[in-house]
Amino acid sequence: MLTNIILCGGNGTRLWPISRALMPKQFVKLFQDRSLFQLTVTRNTAFCKTQLIVSNTEQYFLAMDQLEELKKGNNKYLLEPIGRNTAPAIALACFTLPKDEIVLVTPSDHLIKDQKQYQKVIYRAEKLALEDFLVTFGINPTFPETGFGYIEANGEDVKAFHEKPDFIRAEKYLDAGNFYWNSGMFCFKAGTFLKELKTYSPNIYNTCKIAYEQAKKENITRISHEDMLNIPEDSIDYAVMEKSSKVKVVPSNIGWSDLGSFDALYHEFPKDQNGNTVNENHISIDSKNNLIYGTTRKITTIDIDDLIIIDTDDALLISKKGSSQKVKEVVKKIRENTELHNIHLTAHRPWGTYSILEESKQYKIKRIVVKPGKRLSLQKHFHRSEHWIVISGIAKVTRGDKEYTVQANESTYIPIDTVHRLENIGKIPLVMIEAQVGNYVGEDDILRIEDDYKRIENNDK
């Protein structure tokens, strides 16, 4: 049985506004109420005994919650304070494992539809890994894609790795028949990879080794920010795969997609008789071949063809099909003056969620849900007071030097500059409405006196 190293990097720009930095696409439930991360874990369960999740601190609790939904135990975590690309991420993960451990390295945000073929290529890769090869998976190309790197092969022998081509070169690769899309998936012994990394990228190897040795290793391996900064940034392809003589490729016709754009997502959603994606909130009049995504409001289209319409609570995207790669340009502009690239109206935190119901410059109203047994940091605010109304559950409130409980249909008041904490001491989720009132109601008006989550995140409310 293998160990599945799952890489959870990504900042959510290509599928904005569905995906945000604090809720990237791998954790959005796009298919049968399952996220791409959950689908990754589920399909690898047949041949992987455990999951080693490599993520940043914000994504740790998202992964943990979604693994709990799947009732998956025996999970390990490695937390990176900043990303340094795939070579360091994989190296740090491999340092946590025995040298002879065979790992299956997979991104967390890919879709694979042919499970039978997938299982066959994994078993072939495992056999090659046992022979001390570094195995990559080459996807059989179905069209001249310019957004992927390519692997040129002779059977299972890799002849060369190629950068993303222009369209004419991509057509030549497709016609040649021995070129594959680079999937970003790998299989090898942890020790074999580290040995090759040490040979071809010694600086990455040495700095990762130091970072791992100095890391906090409790139930979770946490790399320090300073040690992470010292590691050179590089991909596994550049650092090892393009240089090593031990590389093999397994051709893989597995129904793969990296879902790197809304155009790619359109092909994976079920369609109605007019080629529109199926959506119970969509009313179509003479409209064809549209991607329609929205979960709350009615979306009506009249005489509209070949569009992408993405409706979320706080942002609407409309694009021509074929142009959705430009979403990254939209996100760059949004970053200049809003937080819409970063977070949804409903934000997921380690203790639960909060949803912004209404806000202005002088007040903000939230719906807060705290999980049983969880609590927020001990904190105070300098520019706002807070009114809490409990809808269901039992809240334990700390206000100054007093502690008391607030139950359903009861309320309490937190004045400005008062130390306070909220805790769910019941067995069901605590649901409450919070009204913030003051001259400034931004999320950064907060001083944390004591933070249970400080080690794993920096913004807990």
Image (cartoon, helix red, strand yellow):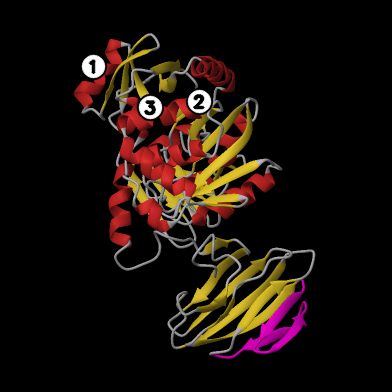
Q: Which residue is drawn at 63% across and 50% down?
A: 219
Q: Is residue 211 or residue 6 the one in the foreground? A: 211
Q: In this view, does 96 lie to the left or right of 247?
A: right
Residue occupying the far top of the picture = 155
Tell me which amino acid carries mark 2.
Lys
Mark 1 or 2, which is nearer the eye?
2
Q: Is residue 328 or residue 102 the one in the foreground? A: 102
Image quarter hosting the N terminus: top right
Tell me which amino acid carries mark 1.
Lys
Who comes first in sequence, dot 3 or dot 1? 1
Image quarter hosting the C terminus: bottom right
Q: Give the x, y percent position of residue 421.
A: 64, 78
From the image, tell me which residue sits under label 1.
172
From the image, tell me which residue sits under label 2.
189
Who comes first in sequence, dot 1 or dot 2? 1
Q: Give the x, y percent position of residue 124.
A: 52, 14
- 160 vs 348: above or below: above
- Whether residue 404 is in magenta: the answer is yes
Write the start and end of the magenta stretch as one range. 393-416
Q: Visible in this render: residue 193?
A: yes
Q: Which residue is drawn at 32% across and 62% down?
A: 335
- The secondary element bearing badge 2 is classed as strand
Q: Give the x, y percent position of residue 5.
A: 53, 36
- 271 vs 409: above or below: above
Q: Visible in this render: residue 303?
A: no
- The secondary element bearing badge 1 is classed as helix
